[in-house]
Amino acid sequence: MKKSEKIVLALAAMAIGVLLIVLKDNFIGIVMTVAGLCLIVFGIVDLFKKCIPPGVVKIVTGLLVILCGWFVVEAVLYVVSAFLLVFGILSLYDKIRQKFKCSTLLRTIMEYAVPSICIAIGILLLFHRGKIVDFIFIFSGILALVEGGVLFFNAFSEE
């Protein structure tokens, strides 16, 4: 991955962290609406390119995501949680299997921090019910900010 891509990824993780802290449980619904709007725009672009079937499918899917997206927030949270858990576990397993070690202790900790934080956020979002929902989203946002900082550090401290 290029350095510029790593910086963009770090900034995106930080932005998601801030949005999780500020918007809390409304964040997923807003993301679903934005995703639906993007699908509609991509469908309209396909229609202008005379790709009728894919364009219609994208527009209908976008409308369904917008109309039903706010009702399936629970399911989306479970899917995101599962994705983060699988990604974090596989990344951590890969680093352990390769016996990943850097020249400095700090760099080694930073390399293992990203998958560990993904696993922690996945576990938090898995248990997002109850009276502590706001705490879970705020703490997940803080962890996402930390992960963005780690990614940012890793992007600039490449060997």
Image (cartoon, rainbow, N blue to C red):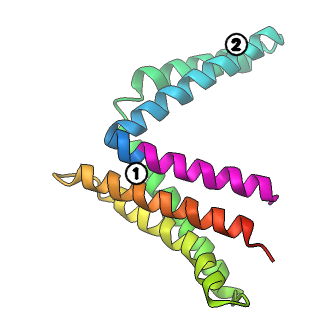
User: Is residue 135 toward the left or the right of residue 23 in the image?
Assistant: left
Front-lying residue, 92 or 56: 92
Q: Quadrant of residue 98?
A: bottom right
User: Which amino acid, by three-letter code, is at mark 1?
Assistant: Tyr
Q: What residue would you read off at disc 1?
A: 78
Q: Residues within 10 Å of mark 1 (few under 14, many from 20)?
A: some
Say if the magenta span includes residue 45: no
The residue pinned by badge 2 equals 44
Which residue occupies the foreground of this view, 47 or 151?
151
Q: Residue at x 37, y 56 (%)?
A: 125
Q: Is the magenta region chiefly helix, strand or loop?
A: helix
Q: Position of residue 158 (x, y in %)?
A: 77, 73
Comes first in the chain, label 1 or label 2: 2
How far, Cα to Cα, is label 1 from label 2?
A: 30 Å
Callout 2: helix, strand or loop?
helix
Position in image of residue 133 (x %, y %): 25, 50
1 and 2 marks in contact (CB < 8 Å): no
Q: In the image, 88: left or right of 151?
A: left
Residue drawn at point x = 60 percent, y = 77 percent = 110
Residue at 63% in and 56% down: 10
Residue 45 vs 28, above or below: the answer is above
Report the amino acid beneath label 2. Ile
Where does the magenta region start and end?
1-19
- The image shows residue 50 at horizontal and vertical percentages of 83, 10
Task: Give the mark count.
Answer: 2
Residue 56: percent from left, percent from top: 66, 14
Q: Is residue 50 visible?
A: yes
In this view of the protein, which residue sits in the foreground, 154 or 89?
154
Q: Is residue 36 above or below residue 8?
A: above
